[in-house]
Image (spheres, rainbow, N blue to C red):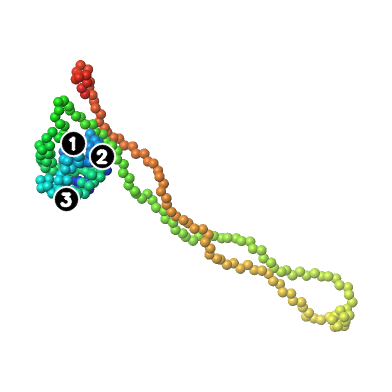
Amino acid sequence: MAKRENTFIGTFDVQAEVLSKITELKSQGYREEDMYVIAQDEDQLTMIKGQTDVKLDTQEDQGFMGRFISTLAGETSSFEAFNSMGLDSEESDTYKREVENGKILLYVDSEYGPSYDRYTETRANTAGTGSAFTNETSASTTDEERLRLHEEQLRVDKERVQTGEVNVGKHVVEDTQTIEVPVEREEVYIERRPVNEATDSATAGGLTGKDAYQDGENIHIPISEERVEVSKTDVVSEEIVVGKRKVQDTEQVTETTRREVADIDEDNDSTTNGRKPL
């Protein structure tokens, strides 16, 4: 797809894309009479033919598309017409292949009309009674007029925007924990037990009764207990996993579109071969 000053050329897959581009170019000031559409066969152009007045050609007609083929063959007359389009042989070959593969080519140039008309006239003179597939109405035995009905079609595009973000960090919080720990300790108890025994040398450690009375005799009993020692160890208590996933939603888009309808006034007294005129 290329766009030079006052010109445009590009290929499309379906007719709807071509019609959308034609509408866009018309809003920029281009005229339908300066637009040329080429396709492989007529079935690819039925919608465009019914809704626009652009010039149409197919490869089978050898009209506008024929100039691509003639240019690649080195024919001077068609090469001059091609040269006015600003295309070289490589570009022509590329667009020719795309049309042959089923794409639809749109060419827009307000200055190309005279070259197209001269080529069409020359082709008509040499082709005898043959006719190309164009939008021009051939002369016939019946008088017919055409009224084109247009309508607006919705085209929906999607744009990805950032709606927010999630920041995950961490900070230190101090807590107070209470743990009950069982501990042991020793207690001293003192009992007085009555003893009714005679003191003799055997019971008094070999002392006589008089010697049994001594000052400063003591008993030492050690007392122990368990004391709690507290230490802290760092452990991983949990981890935070942050990710994202796509969720498919459906949004309804409502827009007002316009279309043209035919207003038909029937005259019951006027008929042509049993057919009511529109």
User: Is residue 194 in view?
Assistant: yes
| Residue hosting label 2 | 15
Residue 20 locus on image (x, y percent): 25, 40
| Residue hosting label 3 | 89
Task: Measure the alpha-carbon separation of dots 2 and 3.
Answer: 26 Å
Seen in the picture, residue 276 relative to 251 is either above or below; the reply is above
Q: Do the residues labelled 1 and 3 touch (CB within 8 Å)?
A: no
- Mark 3 nearby-residue class (10 Å; few <14, some 14–19, many ≥20): some
User: Going from the N terminus, do you reach mark 1 or mark 3 first?
Assistant: 3
Which residue extends farthest top?
269
Secondary element at tag 2 = helix
Residue that appears at 37% across and 49% down? 163
Residue 153 locus on image (x, y percent): 28, 37
- Mark 2 nearby-residue class (10 Å; few <14, some 14–19, many ≥20): some
- Mark 1 nearby-residue class (10 Å; few <14, some 14–19, many ≥20): some
Mark number, residue 64: none
Residue that appears at 61% across and 61% down? 179
| Residue hosting label 1 | 133
Secondary element at tag 3 = helix
Q: In this view, does 194 lie to the left or right of 272?
A: right
